[in-house]
Each structure stands twice: as structure tokens, then as C-alpha cells.
Image (spheres, helix red, strand yellow):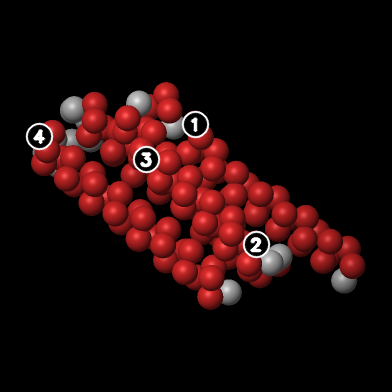
Amino acid sequence: MDLVIIVVVLALIQYIAYGILVGRARGKYGVSAPATTGDPIFERYYRVHQNTLEQLMVFLPAIFIFSQLGNPLIAAGLGAVYLVGRLIYLRGYVADPAQRGTGFMLSFLPSAIMLIWSAALAARNLITA
């Protein structure tokens, strides 16, 4: 379970770092708060940050549920894939939004896999109880 906690902490640090990148982009591209539109590069950083929050809302419960019902080591491994996927998503989206697909899939699929696997394990537990 310690590995899962490390992955979760890294995911939260990653989210904070993306927020810092948004703040830097605000200054660099002259987009004053509370505006969320302006320079296209700023908007890309902003969307990466927002999409990461949207993904975290699924990822965090998924990794904790699967680590309890399934296997914490596999959960941590899938979480590591999520983290790398988010980094690829950031780089791809900021360079060219059309290049965000690989990073998105690498961060979406681990959550989806853990949720589906958890549902199957919970159903099995109900049937065999």
C-alpha cells in the first residue's frame, strides 16, 4: 500500500506543478486573473491543468479501491503509467493540441482498467460471500 500512497502523492504534486505552470504562463503571456482565455499557449497550459483535475477525480478513487479489492502492486504500476501519461499529455497538448491523444489514453486507461477490474472483483465477492 505504501507504493500506492507514493503514486498518489506524486499525482497530487504533479497537479500542483501544472498549476504553477499555469501561473507562469499567465505572467509570460499577459493573461491576468481571473481570465481563462487570451494567448493560445496560456490556454493550453490552463486546459492541461483542468483536464488533469478532471482525470484525478476518477484516478484517485480508482487507485484506492483497486488497491483494496485487487492488488496494490498492480495499482501502483497502473498509477505510474497514469503519471507518465499526464506528462506526455502536457508536452503534447502544449506543443499541439492534436498531439494530446497518446498522453490522454495513457492516463485514462489505467483509471478505467482499475474501475472495471474493481467492479468485477466486488461482484465476485458478492457472489462468493
Residue 63 location, x and y as percent?
A: 58, 60
Q: Earlier in the sequence, mark 1 or mark 2?
A: 2
Residue placed most toward the observer, 106 or 111: 106
Residue with the mark numbered 1: 101
Q: Which amino acid does label 2 sit on?
A: Ile
At 48% from the left edge and 45% from the top edge, which residue is drawn?
85
Amino acid type of the residue tagged 3 in the rendering: Leu
Q: How far apart are marks 1 and 4 (CA)?
A: 28 Å
Q: Residue at x 82, y 66 (%)?
A: 125
> Looking at the image, is mark 2 or mark 3 earlier in the sequence?
2
Q: Distance between the residues labelled 2 and 4?
A: 43 Å
Residue beneath the point at 40% across and 46% down: 87
What residue is pinned by disc 4?
Answer: 30
Label 3, residues with CA under 10 Å away: few <14, some 14-19, many ≥20 = many
Distance, label 3 to label 1, CA atoms, is: 11 Å
**Is 4 located above or below residue 32 in the figure?**
below
x and y, in percent, of residue 106 in the image: 54, 43
Q: Which amino acid does label 1 sit on?
A: Gly
- Graded by Cα atoms within 10 Å as few (under 14), some (14 to 19) or many (20 or more), the crowding at tag 2 reads some
The residue carrying mark 2 is 74
Tag 3 residue: 90
Label pair 1/2, CB-CB below 8 angstroms: no
Q: What element carries label 4?
A: loop
Q: Which amino acid does label 4 sit on?
A: Gly
Q: In this rendering, which labeled residue sits more in front, label 3 or label 4?
A: 3
